[in-house]
Amino acid sequence: MVARIRFDDDPCPVARSVNVIGDRWSLLIVRDAFDGSRRFSEFQRSLGIAKNILAARLRTLEEAGVLRGAPASEGASHREYVLTDRGRALFPVIVALRQWGEDQCFAPGEPHSRLLDRRTGRPLRRLEVKAADGQPVAPPDTAVEKVEDTEKTGQAGKTGKSGKPGRQSRQRKR
Amino acid sequence: MVARIRFDDDPCPVARSVNVIGDRWSLLIVRDAFDGSRRFSEFQRSLGIAKNILAARLRTLEEAGVLRGAPASEGASHREYVLTDRGRALFPVIVALRQWGEDQCFAPGEPHSRLLDRRTGRPLRRLEVKAADGQPVAPPDTAVEKVEDTEKTGQAGKTGKSGKPGRQSRQRKR
DNA sequence: CCCAATCGGTTGCATCTTGCTACCGGCGTG
DNA sequence: CACGCCGGTAGCAAGATGCAACCGATTGGG
């Protein structure tokens, strides 16, 4: 059993997020959902993903509470997958990825799709990381407050398969 | 040859971003780099990743221009991996993932690490997606402006291995 | 100087995961 | 009823991931 490592009990929120949407397809499915895709075939055509992979991803995203799948409109033959509140909360993540991609992954002048404000037709403002008081914050202005290891406190061994820390170095901080 | 699908020529910036950092480890390596990790062993211990995988990821991130690896301090034995400008530009992405994880991936009251403003010791402000004029924007207020297919324009066949569009439905929008 | 421990990897192997093709039942429709 | 679309599942082949074992170059101690 060399199963994929999971971060279900990692104290870092980034790790837990990556645990849910940290593969190539999940984020693109969410992106398409934001753009209005609802049906299996819409995702499939738009992404060019294999059907079995898409089915598996839709299932895991549904289990993670990001999407909700239900038969469309009472007795229809096909299902519809729509974002839940939790899924819609990923909007800043998608926008951040989009802005990074626009800046860093295109040759100058190379055309790319853009996300526009419907009211004005103009592109969105750049995302800014700010302090509580509204001041801009750069990476060196920040520090991670690590949480002390609550190894032996209340909820020990939630996953059931924990126990020995693995043979290779297996200790995560943050 | 059923090689992994790549998005090198996808017109959507999100897809291109996912192409670079769309796996479980890359984003966590970048996160650790923001937090000050520089050495191979630091990443290895912090992440609990296998060494061969870490070596491969550091190489691809270096090739992507996100990290730069160089021997530390002129004649030292070990290399140091530091974020480039392009890597530092991922800060909003990491912050967005962190905020989503904090909100959605922890039980109420469950402890997690936090990213704090060094000046004040307080958590950062929540990221907000805004229009050009500063108004907050929700997902339904936006629309993707697709770029017309410039299939036969200037730079055809950059990758070399393109050509036939694949047997399964292979057409991406956005 | 010699032994040991790190550090930063590489290699080999077992096990997942991904991708593709084929197939299948339900439904609408000409 | 034949046909095609829709939403899948099943069965492979190839790639990615995880683990252990090894390895050369540095430190570090006695």
Image (cartoon, coloured by chain):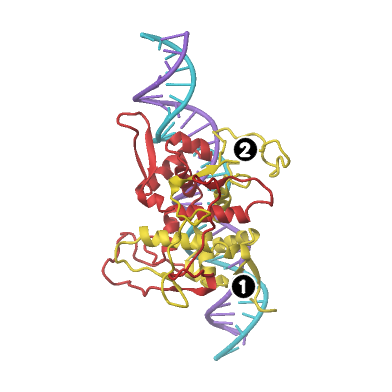
Chain colours: A yellow, B red, C cyan, D purple
Q: Quadrant of residue A20?
A: bottom right
Asked if residue B76 lies left or right of residue A93, the reply is left
Q: Which residue is mark 2?
A: A148
Q: Nearer the viewer, mark 2 or mark 1?
A: 2
The residue depicted at 60 percent of the width and 70 percent of the height is: A82
Q: Position of residue B162 (x, y in %)?
A: 34, 62
Please name whichever residue, D16 or B80, is drawn nearer the observer in this view of the structure: B80
Q: Are marks 2 and 1 in contact (CB under 8 Å)?
A: no
Which quarter of the image is occupied by the N terminus of chain A? top right
Which quarter of the image is occupied by the C terminus of chain A? top right
Work out whether residue A149 can be spotted. Answer: yes
Q: Quadrant of residue B20?
A: bottom left
- N-terminal-most mark, 2 or 1: 1
Q: Dot 2 lies on which element?
A: loop
In the current view of this chain or complex, which residue is farthest to the right?
A154
Is disc 1 surrounded by few (<14), some (14 to 19) or many (20+) residues within 10 Å?
Answer: some
Q: Which residue is mark 1?
A: A80
- The alpha-carbon separation of the residues under discs 2 and 1 comes to 43 Å
Q: Position of residue B96 (x, y in %)?
A: 52, 56
Residue type at mark 1? Glu
Please name whichever residue, A66 or A60, is drawn nearer the observer in this view of the structure: A66
Please name whichever residue, B39 or A25, is drawn nearer the observer in this view of the structure: B39
